[in-house]
């Protein structure tokens, strides 16, 4: 494998490009990390310099490469029922959030859904907690920038270690088990999957005006940490337009809304309401 170094100039070009296309901010200290995580990728592509990689990344042919780049520098890490206190909150506020809806219609957006654990957790939560679940009109929009993550999400196929945090009875009601040469696989119930619409969507650069309806809840967890404060602020304002007054916005445990105070009020750690 070729040992490829990154010059300051190359890092700066890549950094500006990534900031404008996906809103991810890379500080000066990240040059070593970018080099370390991408030099294997450059070798795979048969490239000998980061200048060559930059030209590819910013060309029309490099469109798909942006996803590989993001995967290399960010993480797709997720899990079923991540951040337990979010689910406790939803359960405690079931009446106000769901049962009070005369039309029995629920619309939720899992923005940056990674490999699907988040939207499936929401659907499992609703099935487990709403009486007459089948009579409700429920749709979850689940989006991510990564095609690879979405492919996995669409399959809805998980390993033992992915589901083991859930109660056995919940696994039993919402997955079917299958033996494969690689071990036991858990397939999400297709009835749950059919209520989820998976789409690619870049939260920084794609057009929010395509949404012609409002959401009851938006989950945008553990992705805004990668964005700089201007990008985050603009994104939160775009979410605000899709949430009527009183509706809920849930972000990652380690995140907080520090600006946009006229749009969202804190209800509980990382849970906000539109004002
Ligand atoms: C750490 S995962 C979070 C998954 C899930 N929300 C959770 O909290 O478990 C972050 C996800 O954000 C996605 N992502 C990164 N930049 C994005 C962007 N500009 N637009 C949409 N998704 C993005 C990544 O592909 C990744 O799947």
Image: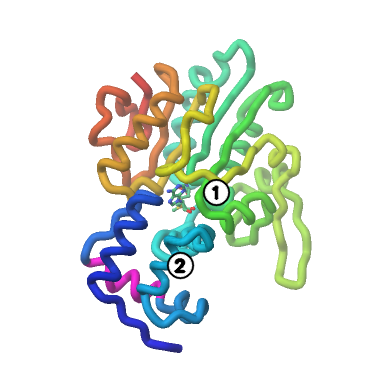
Disc 2 to disc 1, how far (Cα)?
A: 36 Å
Q: Position of residue 250 (x, y in %)?
A: 41, 35
Looking at the image, which is closer to me, 247 or 74? 74
Point 32% across, 41% down: residue = 232
Q: Which residue is mark 1?
A: 80
Confirm if mark 1 falls within 8 A of ligand 1: no
* Magenta span main SS: helix
Is label 2 in contact with label 1 (beta carbons under 8 Å)?
Answer: no
Relative to 39, is 258 above or below?
above
> What's the magenta region?
29-38
Binning the other alpha carbons within 10 Å of mark 1 as few (below 14), some (14 to 19) or many (20 upward) gives: some
Residue 155 shown left or right of residue 11 in the figure: right
Q: Position of residue 56 (x, y in %)?
A: 45, 67
Q: Position of residue 203 (x, y in %)?
A: 44, 42
Q: Nearer the viewer, mark 2 or mark 1?
A: 2
Looking at the image, which is closer to me, 32 or 253? 32
Residue 54 seen in render: yes
Residue 93 shown left or right of residue 159 in the figure: left
Q: Quick check: is 9 in the magenta stretch?
A: no
Residue 226 shown left or right of residue 157 in the figure: left
Which comes sooner in the sequence, label 2 or label 1?
2
């Amino acid at each position: 494998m070729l040992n490829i170094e990154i010059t300051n100039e190359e890092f700066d070009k890549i950094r500006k490009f990534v900031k404008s296309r996906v809103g991810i901010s890379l500080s000066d200290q990240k040059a070593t990390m970018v080099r370390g995580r991408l030099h294997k990728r450059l070798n795979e592509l048969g490239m000998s310099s980061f200048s060559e990689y930059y030209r590819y990344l910013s060309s029309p042919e490099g469109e798909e490469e942006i996803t590989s780049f993001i995967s290399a520098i960010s993480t797709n890490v997720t899990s079923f029922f991540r951040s337990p206190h979010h689910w406790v909150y939803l359960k405690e506020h079931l009446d106000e959030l769901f049962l009070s809806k005369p039309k029995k219609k629920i619309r939720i957006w899992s923005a940056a859904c990674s490999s699907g654990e988040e939207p499936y957790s929401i659907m499992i939560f609703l099935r487990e907690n709403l009486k007459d679940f089948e009579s409700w009109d429920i749709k979850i929009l689940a989006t991510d920038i990564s095609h690879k993550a979405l492919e996995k999400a669409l399959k809805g196929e998980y390993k033992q270690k992915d589901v083991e945090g859930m109660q056995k009875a919940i696994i039993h009601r919402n997955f079917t088990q299958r033996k494969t040469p690689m071990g036991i696989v858990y397939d999400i119930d297709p009835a749950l999957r059919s209520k989820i619409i998976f789409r690619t969507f870049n939260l920084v650069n794609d057009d929010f005006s395509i949404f012609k309806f409002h959401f009851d809840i938006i989950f945008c967890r553990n992705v805004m940490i990668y964005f700089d404060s201007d990008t985050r602020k603009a994104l939160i304002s775009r979410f605000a337009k899709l949430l009527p007054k009183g509706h809920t916005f849930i972000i990652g445990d380690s995140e907080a809304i520090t600006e946009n105070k006229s749009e969202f009020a804190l209800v509980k750690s990382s849970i906000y309401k539109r004002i």
